[in-house]
Amino acid sequence: MQPIRFPGFEIEIIRKRIRRINLHVTPERVWMSIPYRVSRESAEQFARMHQDWILKQRAQLVRLPAEQGTPVADGMQLRLWGQTLRLYVVHGDGAPGLRKEAEALYLTVPQGAGDAQKQAQLHKWFQDELKQALPEVCERWEAVTGRRASGYYIRDMKTRWGSCSLKTGRICINQRLIHEEPACLDYVIAHELTHLYVPNHGPGFWRLMDQFYPNWREIRRKMRK
């Protein structure tokens, strides 16, 4: 049976002796097991109903492998600033490092390098990319909001994209923002700087957000998917 095609991915169809439809999502492929009695039209309708769920699962799977608890594998997919890139691992005698070319990342490691070393190189490279982007973004939004943070730092946070200490004026940025569209980093910086005016999420806070970043609702919806 021909796959069901959507923009950016397709779903393989596999008929089995099962009672209900099952969806499977991995970084490399998406497939759907369907009972013999289910028609092509019903399978397509099921796929359309679950399209958003599939996209969400794929987005979660293409983050840094250290965040997934999976080993670094040649050909796996990672995300950089919202763009999905394929990773190629190069074993050689050259200097270890990571470089981006078009839609690919090339990770150079010594012969015999273990997964921990590959993970460390990936983590450092992605964090350095975020650090390099921060000064320009922070300066731009400090000019827009009229507030200046006393400092910025990056850490891994499970439940927040950012946080602001009213006592110290420091702003913390989630390192996972490197995987999202650049507008998401804009939103988080603008959001946390606005907290230097209003510490809560009351009406006054959102009025200021409307003033500073009129399309913040659209970006927040993307980040909540």
Image (tube, helix red, strand yellow):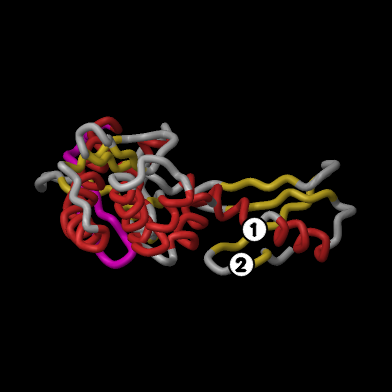
Say above or below: 156 vs 6: above
Q: Which residue is mark 1?
A: 51
The answer to whether 26 appears left or right of 187 in the picture is: right
Amino acid carrying label 2: it is Phe
Label 1: state its secondary structure.
helix
Answer yes or no: is residue 86 visible: no
Taking the spot 70% from the left edge, 51% from the top edge, the residue there is: 32
Asked if marks 1 and 2 touch (Cβ < 8 Å), the reply is yes
**Where does residue 165 sit, x and y in percent of width and height?**
27, 35
The answer to whether 213 appears left or right of 30 in the picture is: left
* Of residues 53 and 198, the one drawn nearer to the viewer in this rendering: 198
* Of residues 28 and 216, the one drawn nearer to the viewer in this rendering: 216
Of the two numbered discs 1 and 2 on the same chain, state the one appearing first in sequence.
2
Q: Quadrant of the N terminus?
A: bottom right
Taking the spot 86% from the left edge, 55% from the top edge, the residue there is: 38
**Where does residue 89 sit, x and y in percent of width and height?**
28, 48
The answer to whether 158 appears left or right of 111 in the picture is: right
Label 2: state its secondary structure.
strand
Amino acid carrying label 1: it is Gln
Q: Which residue is mark 2?
A: 6
Q: Which mark is residue 115?
A: none
**Where does residue 192 sit, x and y in percent of width and height?**
32, 47
Residue ranking furthest to the right: 37
Query: Residue 105 lies in magenta, yes or no?
Result: yes
Say above or below: 172 vs 203: above
Which span is picked out in magenta?
98-114
Question: Which one is in front in this view, the residue at disc 1 or the one at disc 2?
Answer: 1
